Amino acid sequence: MAASTSLPSFGRRAYNRLMQLRGFSDHPDNLTRLFLSPAHRQAAEAVSVMMREAGCDEVSIDALGTVVGRYHGESVDAPALLIGSHIDTVKDAGSYDGTLGVVAGIGVIEALKQSGRRLPFALDILAFGDEENVRFPSNLSSSRALAGTFDPATLDGADEDGMSFRKALLDFGGKPDAIGALARDPSKVIGYLEVHIEQGPVLQHEALPVGIVTAINGASRRRVMVTGQAGHAGTVPMALRQDALTAASEMVLAVEALGAKAALTVATVGRLAVSPNAVNVIPGGVQFTLDMRGPDDGERIAMVQAIEEACRAIAARRSVEIDIAPFYDAPACPCSPSLQAALSEAVARHQIRPLHLPSGAGHDAMAMAALCPIGMLFVRCTDGISHNPAEFASQSDMDQAIRILLDAVEHLARNHSA
């Protein structure tokens, strides 16, 4: 049975909370809330208040800045189902990325508290703080700490102003020496659920408010250096040139074509630098980046190999040199079949066609997969825009998503009791 429609509007309450959190920014003219910044601390304290007001029995900010709100289960020693996302942002951000998942969890607690229901497991709402990988050379440190995979060497990293991760954490009020103790016992965790805007256009194209995530894409990144011969733009005949830019341009088109060969793989050249970059000089060198992703590791690896081989073949044919240097490889992270099923069934109970799709972006769920089964629910965002002030999800879609999340949690509780 779907959650009662007599409950207060989840979408309206979520929107109000999102707008309140939007007010905490490191920049006066846009939303920029970096990990461990003063604005992050203000947002964490505001989320703490929201959690208490919604009905959480315990609320705290842990040693690494994660806000944790617990709604007790029927017994004090009950395991926990975790629901969360992040409250840090990119620079000049939108208001929904990450934060929607936190306020969605708060909405679930609020509904359970108002109805006086306790579940056979506890619910922990988590507001992580280092998902965007903007300030420090770290990523997912907050969620990795709970999963037991935090690397202490991360604390030695520094931001562009020279502030160390360790010092920023101390200034925030955190406790570097207590991070190791944050690791959860897997036997006391049922799973992790995350609601997140899609950050892509598929749901809008399908005219659906929500979708069920099958996997978080694996990713491979490469730095490519193409070296030709710089020369005078007016004196070197076309047939005798070793033009690094024309070679790189052909490679970029090959990346586009090969990235599209499989239905769910993508490949992107996101950065390109030309040398000497002068109007009257044949380019002698080009550097570019490759970002290649897919939900199936076998398909992704095959695509990476095909792209690298194509680039080398183009270089040989055009008499330029090429160096391809890997700098990042991460496997795909599949979502739990049982949690996918729980979300899919909840979607269907709300008379919405269940659509399963992969996530092309990374999420805290990737880190949490080392601890427990994970599930994700995507919410439609206008034109697929994200990491942008124009980022938007309607109150209606958010309302649907939170009701579906509550429905799934309630059915997981029934199955847990059975």
Image (spheres, helix red, strand yellow):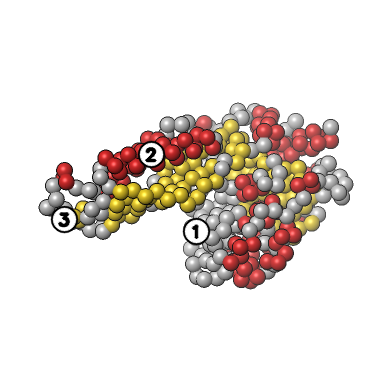
Q: Quadrant of residue 393?
A: top right
* Quadrant, the C terminus: top right
Q: Quadrant of residue 377?
A: top right
Gap in angstroms between the C-alphas marked 1 and 2: 36 Å
Q: Which residue appears at 60% of the width and 62% of the height?
A: 154
Foreground label between 2 and 3: 2
Residue that numbered label 2 is attached to: 309
Residue that numbered label 3 is attached to: 232
x and y percentages locating residue 120 in the rendered image: 83, 41
352 vs 314, nearest the viewer: 314
212 vs 142, nearest the viewer: 142
Q: Secondary structure at mark 1?
A: loop
Residue that numbered label 1 is attached to: 91
For label 1, the crowd category at 10 Å Cα-Cα, with few meaning under 14, some 14 to 19 and many 20 or more, is many
155 vs 379, nearest the viewer: 155
Residue type at the position of mark 3: His
Residue contact between numbered discs 1 and 2, judged by CB atoms under 8 Å: no
Q: Is residue 218 left or right of residue 191?
A: left
